[in-house]
Amino acid sequence: MALWEAILCAFLAATLGGLYLAGAFRKQRANEPPLEKGIIPWLGCALEFRRDGVEFLRRMQTKHGDIFTVLLGGSYFTFLMDPLSFGTVVKEARAKLNFTEYAEELVQKVFGYRPSLMTHKIIESASTKHLKGNGLEVMTQAMMDSLQTVMLHSLGSAEVGKPWKEDGLFHYCYNMVFRAGYLALYGNEPRKSKDAQRNDLQHSEEIYEEFRKYDRLFPRLATSTLSYGKRKEAERLKRLFWGVLSVKNVQQKDNISGWVREQEQQLAEEGMPEYMRDRFMFLLLWAAQGNTGPASFWLLLHLMKNPKAMEEVGKEVDRVVKESGQEVKPGSAVINVTKEMLTKSPILDSAVEETLRLAAAPLLIRAVMEDMQLKMNDGREYALRKEDRVGIFPYLAAHMDPEIHPEPHVFKYDRFLNQNGTKKEFYKNGEKVKYCTMPWGAGTSMCPGRFFAVNEMKLFVFLMLTYFDMELVNKEDEVPPLEKSRYGFGVMQPAHDIQFRYRLQY
Ligand code: HEM
């Protein structure tokens, strides 16, 4: 064979091998879901998906129905769009559909954290102890105290009159809830130090500013699409957080939450090196603080845009405060809202659920560990291949389904309540939909902080409505659209902020 023939053969073999690895030759087999490979080898439909995931999946759903497989950046994802069938994925044994595989890859990429075998168990058991039941009472009180500190401080002294203050509503809500949550979880400056409270306020503000820089980069960091310069910036921020939240630094604080302290201790007992535990601290901050602030923003905004909702929630808040025997008097605008009080506000509960229906858009992913059959609710069965992934995107498949939630784009504060005050059930094709909303994920990966998160949002609303008058600067401003690049990453953020003003009532 001539040399040029040998080179040509090698080139052809390499190209075919590359195309094979890129999945270009994959065909839909009998019993498999419809396949969509896009036109670019390896990337498949990744660009379209990243541009606007909702639009892309809606188009696929119209074309293929409620199950289909898509090539995205070298991996095949089977999307299940039938909410009545979610249970089969969520409850499937870990040996077949595994949550940790994909999650481990992601946390290594974005936080530099390599999970140990026990990490998930440690998070689960610490959360059961500290973010539920009696532990939740302690955490709710810590959040209450920190919220009072940051919210009342932001106004200065009430004695100098009650001037209006103006701010971006998203900035204000995220800032307040983030800083209070950070202080409640990671502790305060040692109380023996002079100016401890002032230092807490200043330090939490600095942390918030840096966190937001990372937060903005996060979606592109997770999808490996940052420019070189932005990647360097993300690396700088990551290192900054590993330092600020290092085990050594956090241990200097007073009132560290049991949730943070115990997880760190258990990882240490398991033999995890200290530098890796520093990274874990950053991962926890992200998980605990990245969603609740944006969710509180949407809740307050929807209440402000819906006078009837604001009136009903306001009446409920007043009643609960009065029933607790407290009164907000001029000059002493301080109330204490307890976990117990927060159990007596069904209207606010419904408004919180409705807010999360509209704003929470996580993408739940499971790795297929062996060739298997997926049985749909209507009896159809589909073959899944080992090493593919299964994706559930409840925002589109359930939250926005007009059959489950009529007028899905409208905020209805009492959507989740029956007239007699009990919780409503939802139906599709005449069948009850268990997974009618899934802001917290489900199954093994379900958010362990959900009870605390709801209490944080409710505390924030209790205090805002009790302490402040507030209004949008421009009452005609529409609710801003969602920032599309964040689909799949939890609670959505607005494409732009919206100005409001607030002042002390008393
Ligand atoms: C509105 C607020 C929140 C929302 C919507 C939310 C949502 C979620 C979702 C969807 C997941 C699962 C992700 C997946 O399946 O891959 C998750 C995981 C997690 N969340 Fe939340 N979360 C919120 C607040 C919180 C808070 C306040 C905490 C703790 C104080 C917390 C702690 C965690 C942790 C530690 C995980 C990872 C669990 C594990 O991998 O074992 N979250 N969250």
Image: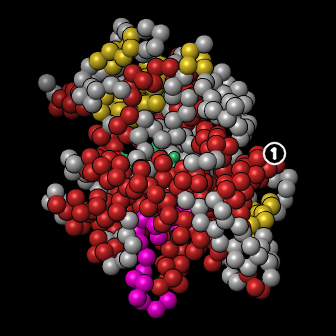
Residue drawn 34% across the image and 52% down it: 129
* Residue 280 percent location from the top left of the image: 31, 60
Q: Quadrant of the N terminus?
A: top left
Report the span colored magenta.
Answer: 175-195
Q: Quadrant of the C terminus?
A: bottom right
**Helix, strand or loop status at disc 1:** helix
Q: Amino acid at mark 1?
A: Lys
Question: Is any atom of residue 378 visible in this view?
Answer: yes
Q: Nearer the viewer, residue 370 or 139?
A: 139
Q: Nearer the viewer, residue 278 or 163?
A: 163
Residue drawn 53% across the image and 78% down it: 201
Q: Which residue is mark 1?
A: 308
Q: Is residue 184 left or right of residue 445?
A: right
Q: Residues within 10 Å of mark 1 (few under 14, many from 20)?
A: few
Task: Residue 191: say if magenta.
Answer: yes
Question: Is any atom of residue 36 visible in this view?
Answer: no
Q: Is residue 231 left or right of residue 164?
A: left
* Residue 2 percent location from the top left of the image: 16, 27
Residue drawn 37% across the image and 70% down it: 256
- Colour convention of the picture: secondary structure
Is 210 located above or below residue 428 in the figure?
below
Is 181 located above or below residue 54 in the figure?
below
Q: Nearer the viewer, residue 16 or 252?
A: 252
Residue drawn 80% across the image and 60% down it: 472
Is 455 located above or below residue 395 in the figure?
below
Q: Is residue 165 left or right of residue 47?
A: right
